Image (cartoon, rainbow, N blue to C red):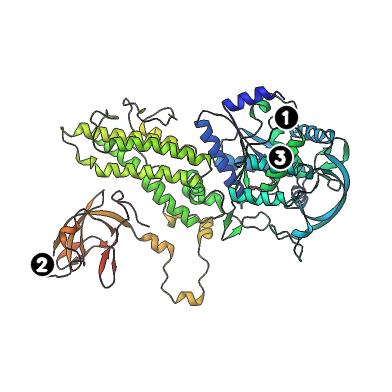
Amino acid sequence: MDLTGSLIKKYMSAYYITTPIYYPNAEPHAGNAYTTIAADVLARYHRLKGKDVCYLTGVDEHAANVYNAAKEEGLSPQAYCDKIAPTFVKLWERLNISHDIFFRTTSDLHKRGAQKFLNVLYDNGDVYKGKYEGYYCVSCEEFFSEKELTDDKVCPTHKLPLQWLEEENYFFRLSKYQERLLTHFHENPDFVYPETRRNELLNFLESGLQDVSISRASLPWGIPFPFDPKHIIYIWIEALSNYITALGYETENEEYQTFWPADVHIMGKDIARFHALLWPAMLMAANLPLPKQIVAHGWLTKDGEALSKTRGIFIDMDGNIDTYGVDAFRYYLLREFSFGNDGDYRPTRLHQRYNADLANDLGNLLNRVLGLVNKNFDGIPEPTTPGEFDEEIKQMAQKTSETLDAQMNTFAFDSALETIWEFVRRVNRYVQQTEVWTLTKPETKPRMGTILYNSLEALRFVSVLISPFIPDTAEKIQKQIGLSEFDSVADWGRLPTDLKVSKGEPIFPRVDLKKEKPQQKKETAKPKKKESEKKTDLISFADFQKMDLRVANVISAELIEGADRLLKLQVDLGTEKRQVVAGIAEHYKPDTLIGKQVIVVVNLEPATIRNVESHGMILAASGDSIVLASPETDVPLGTQVR
Ligand code: MSP
């Protein structure tokens, strides 16, 4: 390998990111999707930063669990893989995954590469013959040591009985690399992310490494040892080598030289040990450079349990994506959970995030700004008249982009999205604070144009920042603003004014849960009530959903004649003004309420109280005294409360 050339290229622009290659013993599930989406976000983010990205994913076909699944269906393992592998490709298409390589380990390129790699380990003296016996889990493809065994001898992850295996095996001298691995861990504190995982692995490493068996004589499905074809290569040794064979390790071609070593291997915490200890030791044995970072995320759970192909615990991805769209699904997974920790998937939370963050904060902002531009200008107005808050918005845009960079470098996807949304909410407030919709007179119109220009530029800026996470939405926003080609530069002030903005279809249309598909209903349905529960006054989520609560501003308040407790309020909901009667006169003087944000039940049927019409109800904590409920900080008028 031309080390010098490779290193120069790498430092300049190459970025290589991988997911694990998944077992195609069944169709992909949401856990696989979670890893693949996270890696996709990183790949897209680094492309945005001008990197030459190679994003690898694929399937790990020579597993015993694949062999068994094929047998059950009466198919050859190859025919079975040929049937299942395309289901992964199809799902990645649906999830808008931008991988560069979908790799199959039954490809000749991989077979030859894996054999070459094994030859190198053998020639370097790190492979020897010995006898192996022990308990084995076919789902993990892993032996369990005496100290890891439970009395009932089941796999702690898959809860399946372990099998006793006895074989003459080849071994890899993993123990020989213990010291070098320790040194590598200490010299590269960021080698494994997150730190908790790093510390776990470091403890394991310090407790001592044993040589590992790397051949199987009893399985008829796999890649034969190049120097002893009776044996096949142990799946993990073969699978890990895919990260180099897929690039062209066999011939050490240009792609391989450009992209190896990998910048990031992403995976679930379950397989961090293979990636952070075994794989680097194998690379050391072959005198190859090590990947820069091993990033292990937490598990996605359903009702607190790990997803499992074998145990039938799954998330209805298709149903949820049909209802909310791919971007909402991607957004929810990355916004809701902290990447290194486990996270419980809840369709109700996806629904809330959809309404609050996507439809309300982002979708409504776009709609509102486009509506105002269309109503008052012919195309994008010139920003001729600077004024209050403009500079703050501009500064915040740039700061948001910088904070985001730091968060992406530590895989803090949830914080990164929150950072972007703080900006989105600030822009909503900008529109509100400047009361831009009122500036229609000839003398104020230039200022109106400037505020709307800034709001559109802020939306373009946001679209760039969100594009790695929710790429379709980013494109839709730019199209609606009138850009014909995606402008991916996060620098303020690039938006041209010679564009025609579109009418603005809602990018996140309201989702009415009543229209939900039957299979998804099953997913989100509550378990049947127990007798004891029926007696309590629980309302269903669907009933709760019927309430439309919104934030409004009090614009006027006056006492109602002859009623000591009642006030007549006029409130502004952003889109309309209303009159509401509230029984708060004993606790609030009318003039103290002006300008206050309150929460209004807007879909309550109208009532006439003391001859005064009331269109809604104001929420308040009603105990010994009455205290109005209002958002902790000001939010755009009309914001839904959930
Ligand atoms: N084939 C091996 C990996 C070889 S890589 C050289 C394998 N495959 S797998 O099909 O079991 O997929 C494992 C990966 O899928 C996990 O590491 C993780 O990335 C993802 N997930 C599987 N279940 C998951 C969850 N419940 N939650 C999140 N991710 C999960 O192991």
* Left or right, 403 with reference to 445: right
* Quarter of the image that includes the C terminus: bottom left
First of labels 2, 3 by sequence position: 3
Position of 449 compared to 541: left or right?
Answer: left
Provide the secondary structure element on which disc 1 rests. loop
Does the Cβ of the disc 1 residue fall within 8 Å of ligand 1? Answer: no
- Does label 3 or label 1 sit earlier along the sequence? 1
For this rendering, which residue is in front, 55 or 363?
Answer: 55
Disc ID at residue 249: 1
CB contact under 8 Å: marks 2 and 3: no
**Residue 280, disc:** 3
Residue 276, x across and y down, in percent: 68, 44
Circle 1 residues within 10 Å: few <14, some 14–19, many ≥20:
many
Residue sitting at the far left: 561
Mark 2 element type: loop
Distance from disc 2 to disc 3, alpha carbons, whole Å, reads 82 Å
**Of callouts 2 and 1, which one flags the residue occurring earlier in the amino acid sequence?**
1
Q: Is residue 502 visible?
A: no
In this rendering, the label closer to the viewer, 2 or 3:
3
Judge depth for marks 2 and 1 and give the one in front: 1
Relative image position of residue 212 (x, y in whole percent): 80, 47
Nearest the eye: 218 or 519: 218
Q: Is residue 332 left or right of residue 131?
A: left
Percent across and percent down for residue 488 are: 45, 30
Say whether residue 595 is visible: yes
Are the residues at dot 2 and dot 1 in contact (C-beta closer than 8 Å)?
no
How many numbered discs?
Answer: 3
Which quadrant is the N terminus positioned in? Answer: top right
Write down the residue under mark 2.
Answer: 561
Instruction: Tell me the CA gap for discs 3 and 1.
Output: 16 Å
